[in-house]
Amino acid sequence: MKIQFNKPTIYLSHSMRGDGTVSIQENCRRASKVEEKICRIFPEIGIYCPGSHDLSLQVLWDAKKITVEDIMYADLEILRACSGWMWWETGPSVGCEQEWEEAIKMNFTKDLIHYPIEIIPTDLLKANYGEVRRLLTPIVENSKKRFKESLNV
C-alpha cells in the first residue's frame, strides 16, 4: 500500500507507554491535544499523530494479536510518506528513538549526536500559541519545502 498525503504532513513522534506515571491512553490523549493545537496554528499542514489513531491498535494489543514490532513497522511506513518529522519529547521512548533514526535517513533532521530543533522538550500543551509558532515554524517551513519538491519529481 502506497501512502500519499495531499498536503505537507509532519509526523509527530510522542511517547506511548511513557515512564509509567500515566496510562497509554492518557499519553495518546495528550498527544492528540498537541496535534489539534498545532493544526489550529498551522492549518496549511497536516500532522500525523500516532496517538490519534491508536484505538484499533490498542484493541489488537490487548488481544495479543499485534506486537510492538508490527506497530513500529506501520509507524515507520507512515513516517516515510510524510514530508517532515518532530518529536514531542515527554520522556524516554524507544519507539521515538527508532523514528528519529528513520527521520535522519529521510533527511528530516540531524544525526543522533546533536539535539536538533525537531526534538521539542517544551510542554506544548502549556505553551502559548506564539511560543508554539516560534518553535515549529522552521520545521513547518522545511516540511512545506520538501513536499513541494516531491511534487516536482
Image (tube, grey):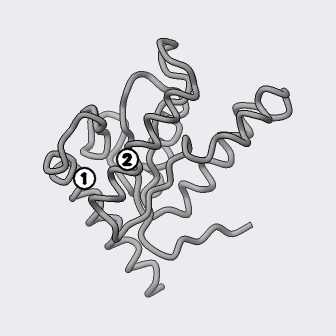
Type of amino acid at the residue the image marks with label 1: Leu
State yes or no: discs 1 and 2 in contact (Cβ < 8 Å): yes
Along the line of sight, which residue is nearer the eye, 84 or 123? 123
- Depicted 49 relative to depicted 114: above or below: below
Q: Position of residue 41 (x, y in %)?
A: 27, 59
Q: Position of residue 13 (x, y in %)?
A: 46, 42
Q: Position of residue 46 (x, y in %)?
A: 43, 63
Q: Is residue 54 left or right of residue 123?
A: right
- Depicted 12 relative to depicted 89: above or below: below
Q: Which residue is mark 2?
A: 86
| Displayed quadrant of residue 127 | top left
Q: Position of residue 99 (x, y in %)?
A: 51, 42
Residue found farthest to the bottom: 152
Q: Which residue is mark 1?
A: 136
At x 49%, y 21%, the residue is 18
- In three-dimensional space, the C-alpha distance between marks 1 and 2, rounded to whole angstroms, equals 9 Å
